[in-house]
Amino acid sequence: MRNIWRDSRFWVISVLAVLALLLGIQHNRAAQRGATNPFAEAVMAIVAPVQSALVSAWDFLSDFGYGVWHGRRLRAENERLRRELEALRTQEIVHEELRQENERLRRLLAFSQTQRKPPLVARVLAIQPSAYFHTLIVGAGQARGVRPRMVAVTDRGLVGVVYLTTRYTAHVLLITDPNASVGARVQRAESRAVGVCRGRGEEDLLLTFLAKDADVRPGDVVVTSGLGGVYPAGIPIGTVEEVMEQRQAGMREARVRPFVDAMRLEEVLLLQGEGAAS
């Protein structure tokens, strides 16, 4: 029953639409001649709402179809642009990593050219700070000529000393390790005070065994003294942060902030120290 009603309604609307079209044509022709047609005007008044509804429905369906098609195209284009943007971001990250690595290697190369013997470049594989040991492992070992007591540095300064090697790796004792010590000297020409820099298991070092009248001031640069037979002289260690008096021992001490942050190392240079094992 519903289907019959739908079919009859469709035909009624269709007939009215055609009738409205024909009457509209006749009305226009009559209007051009200056004549009026009361019957046509009455029919047009009845059919006009139906005609308007049909036009509105057609416009709605047309806009809806265009919106569906256009929306799908926009979603596909947005998805493509999103993938391209992610790819560009990935490339940017990779390029930035390469740029930073290139910059670090350039600085290491410039520093290595100041050495009498060409140092070895080794990539840091692991950093192992603990309450008792501060060490790192580098990817160069006996196969590349690495031996115990070789000194690890960067272009910024001293890192530590090799104390154990395997065929392809080496273990470096950091200068911040409680077991580490290095002969040190204040670089300032008016001072040149000597002492020993010791690790404390913390970020800072302790410059100790200074004479009680040693001229040491905050801001002084501390370098290796070359005394002790392991570390070559002149390697930057750090900057004096604070000077302390040891009244009982009759000496002065200083807290030194190292130039090198071992936790951020990615490559090191291995120098042939004065006392390196062969």
Image (cartoon, rainbow, N blue to C red):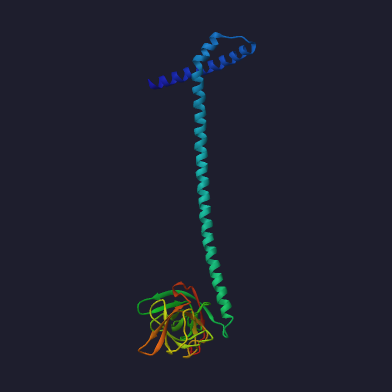
User: Eyeballing the image, is 83 above or below 247?
Assistant: above
User: Eyeballing the image, is 258 above or below 33?
Assistant: below
Identity of the residue drawn at 50% across and 29% down: 60
Give percent across and percent down for residue 179: 39, 84
Give percent across and percent down for residue 197: 43, 84
Identity of the residue drawn at 54% across and 67% down: 98
> In front here: 7 or 102?
102
Give percent across and percent down for residue 199: 40, 82
> In front here: 16 or 102?
102
Q: Is residue 249 left or right of residue 32?
A: left
Identity of the residue drawn at 56% across and 14% down: 23
Figure disc tally: 0
Give percent across and percent down for residue 218: 46, 79
User: Eyeballing the image, is 55 above or below 169?
Assistant: above
The quadrant of the picture occupied by the N terminus is top left
> In front here: 219 or 213?
213
